[in-house]
Image: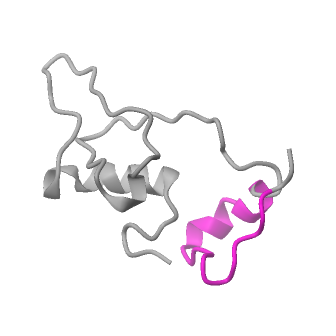
Amino acid sequence: MPAPVALSAADRPTQWWYDAMGYDELHKYGTGKGITVAVIDEPIDPSVPELKGKLASVTTLCPNQRVATGTGAAADHATNVASLIVGSGRGSGGP
């Protein structure tokens, strides 16, 4: 599998964790394509631009039948977590 193209200066995150986790090194070996990730959190807002077309499903397996989707403050945390995993970083005002 070919290595992904390096991020441009404008797209490179400026958060400390990017360097601390060695993302530049990781990007030499893979893209994450084909990987499934589960977010176990509060409701997610699948309508935000950062997540459009990137979620395989939004469901809940909670026995108390809590909703899997939401908007506003109730969905802020999980939506931001999902955006960090599958997004570009721009959805939450990032670079």
**Residue 33 in picture, x, y percent from top left:** 66, 42
Q: As rendered, which of 55 and 80 lies closer to the eye?
A: 55
Is 38 included in the stretch rendered in magenta? no
Q: Quadrant of the N terminus?
A: top right
**Residue 5 in picture, x, y percent from top left:** 78, 65
Image-based side of 58 in relation to 74, left or right: right
Image-based side of 33 in relation to 6, left or right: left
Does residue 11 sit above or below 54 in this rendering? Answer: below
User: Outermost residue toward the front?
Assistant: 53
Please identify the quarter of the rendering in which residue 32 is found.
top right
Which residue lies at the image location 50% right of the left edge and 51% below the top edge? 85
Which residue lies at the image location 45% right of the left edge and 74% below the top edge? 94
Chief secondary structure of the magenta span?
Answer: loop
**Residue 2 in picture, x, y percent from top left:** 86, 51
- Number of numbered labels in the structure image: 0
What segment carries the magenta color? 4-26
Image-based side of 90 in relation to 2, left or right: left
Which residue lies at the image location 61% right of the left edge and 36% below the top edge? 35
Q: As rendered, which of 63 and 10 lies closer to the eye?
A: 10
User: Outermost residue toward the top?
Assistant: 63
User: Outermost residue toward the right?
Assistant: 2
Please identify the quarter of the rendering in which residue 40 is found.
top left
Which residue lies at the image location 36% right of the left edge and 69% below the top edge? 92
Does residue 44 sit above or below 62 in this rendering? Answer: below
